Amino acid sequence: MAARADVAAFFLPMHTATRLALPVIDRIRDLNPAARLIAYGLYAPLSEDTLRAHGVSRIIGAEFEKDLTRAVRGEQTLPPRTLQRVTFIQPDRSDLPPLTRYASLQVGSTRKVVGYTEATRGCKHRCRHCPIVPVYDGRFRAVDADVVLADIRAQVAAGAQHITFGDPDFLNGPTHAMRILDRFAGEFPGVTFDATIKVEHLRLHADLLPRLRDARCAFVTTAVESFDDDTLEALDKGHTRADFEGVVRHCRDIGLTLSPTFVAFTPWTTLDRFCGMLQAIDELDLVNAVAPVQYAIRLLIPQGSRMLELAPIREQVTHFDAATLTHVWRHADARVDELQAALERLAGTRVNAARAEFFGSVWDLAHAAADRPAPQRRPVPSRATVPYLNEPWYC
């Protein structure tokens, strides 16, 4: 089919998808030199130079539906960084693989089939390390509630028992989000959901969190990134360590499960600070809530990243690597990079390991790297009470 196609279009919503697409683009170009190659999605404009070097002739950014249709027809489109408004319609997922082929939700020994939808696109915040910012620049688009509910309805009919709201931040438009959740809870009484929400929004909209719980929220993913306030300030996250600790207490009091994510390795990370991060996770009783891969996440600096606004970052960047689509940086302390590499290897082989067991391995490795005795840890309760997706979120 690829050898006969007039057009081949590649959806690039994430960094990993873009890297995986490059060899496929090369393969199709070899098989079918006459085919017009199109790249669309969030990472298309961020990777424009690299994509064009691989033969892609049309680059389309976020809010791509209209321009993608025009491009396939051979019509003129807007520049890739133009953020136009789209009239949303219900997605047609009928020719996709069945939902059982995708990630599932694990709740103790029970596995649930998962569907996916979005109530909004983009984000009104400008966190410095986020790849959404160079494209949306503090803007977001709300998807009509009827469209969102119709999408969920079709996926529930196809077997979905849980819905992931894939918005970069579900509470960018809190009134819109709660309107959707109220309808969701009433129409699908046996279906659970999860959503991604900033620490800042969990704090500012604390009064809404019981409504998430009552609508059967299995867990909330929240990008904590760091426990160090100077790192949080550099990342422009909009919260402090104390803010997050307050959110943890509040969510625990009301029975709402958190799934924290981290950028564990940055130019500001030291071995002592990394051990301090582990100690904070232990003290806050979050060991079962943190996926193994989170301990190995290294700051990613793609094209257009706001991280390059910071002089210390520019000084540590050695070059741009077209193969990995990132600005490569080295830590001033080689031991920090060595620990990150070791944890990355560990996570790669044990990504679905029991979290308490994995945390113990990280604890021992980190303290050995810091040449510090590993102190006694708190007893960790059973993981069975913590729901999680078996394909961990790690963007």
Image (cartoon, rainbow, N blue to C red):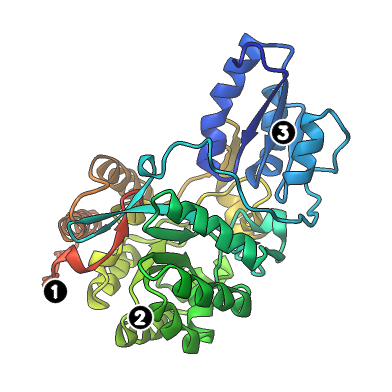
> Is residue 263 something one can see in this rendering?
no
Please state which amino acid type lies under the numbered disc 2.
Answer: Val
Residue 290 placement: quadrant: bottom left
Question: Residue 248 — which label?
Answer: 2
Q: Nearer the viewer, residue 22 or 116?
A: 116
Verify CB contact (< 8 Å) between mark 3 and mark 1. no
Provide the residue designation for mark 1: 378
Q: CA distance from mark 2 to mark 3?
A: 42 Å
Question: Residue 49 — which label?
Answer: 3
Q: Position of residue 25 (x, y in %)?
A: 61, 23
Q: Residue at x 29, y 74 (%)?
A: 280
| 230 relative position to 382: left or right | right
Please state which amino acid type lies under the numbered disc 1.
Answer: Arg
- Mark 1 lies on a secondary structure that is loop
Verify CB contact (< 8 Å) between mark 2 and mark 3. no
> Is residue 269 something one can see in this rendering?
yes
Q: Nearer the viewer, residue 268 or 146?
A: 146
Q: Residue at x 46, y 62 (%)?
A: 268
Question: Residue 69 — which label?
Answer: none
| 270 relative position to 75: left or right | left
Q: Quadrant of the N terminus?
A: top right
Q: Earlier in the sequence, mark 3 or mark 1?
A: 3
Foreground mark, 2 or 1?
2
Q: Position of residue 174 (x, y in %)?
A: 59, 78
Task: Reply above or below: 351 against 204.
Answer: above
Q: CA distance from mark 3 to mark 1?
A: 50 Å
Q: Residue at x 37, y 87 (%)?
A: 250
Please state which amino acid type lies under the numbered disc 3.
Answer: Asp
Q: CA distance from mark 2 to mark 1?
A: 17 Å
